[in-house]
Image (cartoon, rainbow, N blue to C red):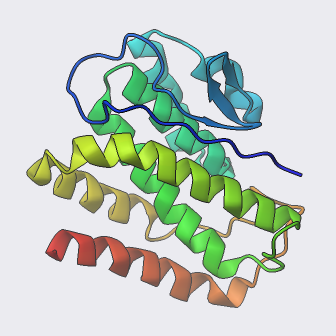
Amino acid sequence: ILSILLFSCNSKSDNKPAKEPIGIYVEPYYNSDPFKINVGSYSEALKTNDEKKILEVAQKIKANINKVDLMTMYVLSTRLYDLNKKDEAVYWFYTASFRRNVLKQTVLDNEHGTEAGELTQALDAFKTVLGEFVNGYALGQIDKNIEIITAVIAHNSNMKSLSTVYPSLKFDETKLPEAVKNAVNDREEFIAY
């Protein structure tokens, strides 16, 4: 059973560069102390403290977005935030959250204790703990935030099924168009607010 442990520190939205990773963890995927990343093929690349390299990783993930799992996107957002690439962190946080919303509406057998249930629980946990930091920053930059949300909608409104990313899970593919539409509407309502 997936063990999900959450911790957040008090300073959530300052504009100072991160001197160390923000204090969050969602086991077994990410832990800031001791520092650990376990999200498959991108794990080692996401450990970099080089801003240029982390942006290169982001471009690789973007180029293969329909083959990248959502936890990797949340970890990418975390690392970008750690390296003071906060606008990029917001983009990836909102992209992961958009796709998480689609997953939750299309995945079958999403009960506690199932593989799908454990995954959605972990994604929810990551969204909650990382969201405190990312949203704290993003909501202080409203015009930039709207620009980022608009880009997230544009880049994800034609997303493919997540069955390629999660082949062991079952999805109701007939719900995909409506789930994507709902995710778009959620972001558009946020902009309108």
Judge left or right: residue 132 versus residue 128. Answer: left
Q: Is residue 51 left or right of 136 when viewed as pictured?
A: right
**In this view of the protein, can residue 59 be seen by the observer?**
no
Image location of residue 133, percent across then percent down? 36, 40
In this rendering, is residue 180 above or below 160? below
Say which quadrant the C terminus sits in. bottom left
Q: Position of residue 129 (x, y in %)?
A: 49, 45
Residue at x 49%, y 53% (from the top left corner):
128
The residue depicted at 45 percent of the width and 13 percent of the height is 20
**Which one is in front, 23 or 36?**
23
**Residue 49 location (% of width, % of height):** 48, 10
Name the foreground residue: 3 vs 127. 3
Identify which residue is drawn at 88% across, 67% down: 114
Residue 70 seen anywhere in this rendered image of the structure: yes
Q: Residue at x 80, y 66 (%)?
A: 116
69 shown above or below 9? below
Q: Nearer the viewer, residue 163 or 183?
A: 183
Farthest left residue in view? 143
Q: Position of residue 53 (x, y in %)?
A: 48, 15
